Amino acid sequence: MAAKTVGIAVDDELRPALDEVVTHFAHGNRSEFLRLAVREFQARLRLEQLHALRDTARSERDGRIYSPDEVTALIESALTRDQS
């Protein structure tokens, strides 16, 4: 993986806070901190997407919660239909 330099502007007022979190989370390495931050926020994004998907599914099912056996049966039924 080849790294590319990316310029990011940081306000003077934010600089002490940046230095603090970079020191704590990335041992003073700003590039590593940015990589960690991107991974963290990407994980949060995925969680938000999963919650939205869950909420959509719940609303489509009028809030009904299916047992593991019911979920398995629904999946098997869908796979059988798709193979036909």
Image: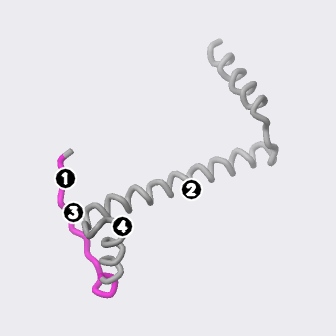
Counting residues from the start of the chain, the first of labels 1 and 4 encountered is 1
Direction from residue 48 to residue 72 in the image, left or right: right
- Quadrant placement of the C terminus: top right
Q: CA distance from mark 4 to mark 2?
A: 24 Å
Residue position for label 1: 3
Q: CA distance from mark 1 to mark 3?
A: 9 Å
**The quadrant where residue 6 appears:** bottom left
- Report the mark closest to the observer, 1 or 4: 4
Residue plotted at (34% across, 78% down):
20
Residue plotted at (50% across, 56% down):
45
Label 1's element? loop
Residue position for label 2: 48
- Report the mark closest to the observer, 4 or 3: 4
- Do residues under tags 1 and 3 come within 8 Å of each other at their CB atoms? no
Residue position for label 3: 6
Magenta residues?
2-15
Query: Mark 4 is on which residue type?
Result: Phe
Residue position for label 4: 25
Counting residues from the start of the chain, the first of labels 4 and 3 encountered is 3
- In percent of width and height, residue 82 lies at 63, 18
Label 4's element? helix
Counting residues from the start of the chain, the first of labels 2 and 1 encountered is 1
Measured along the vertical axis of the image, is residue 68 above or below residue 27?
A: above
- Do residues under tags 4 and 3 come within 8 Å of each other at their CB atoms? no
- In percent of width and height, residue 63 lies at 80, 48
- Report the mark closest to the observer, 1 or 3: 1
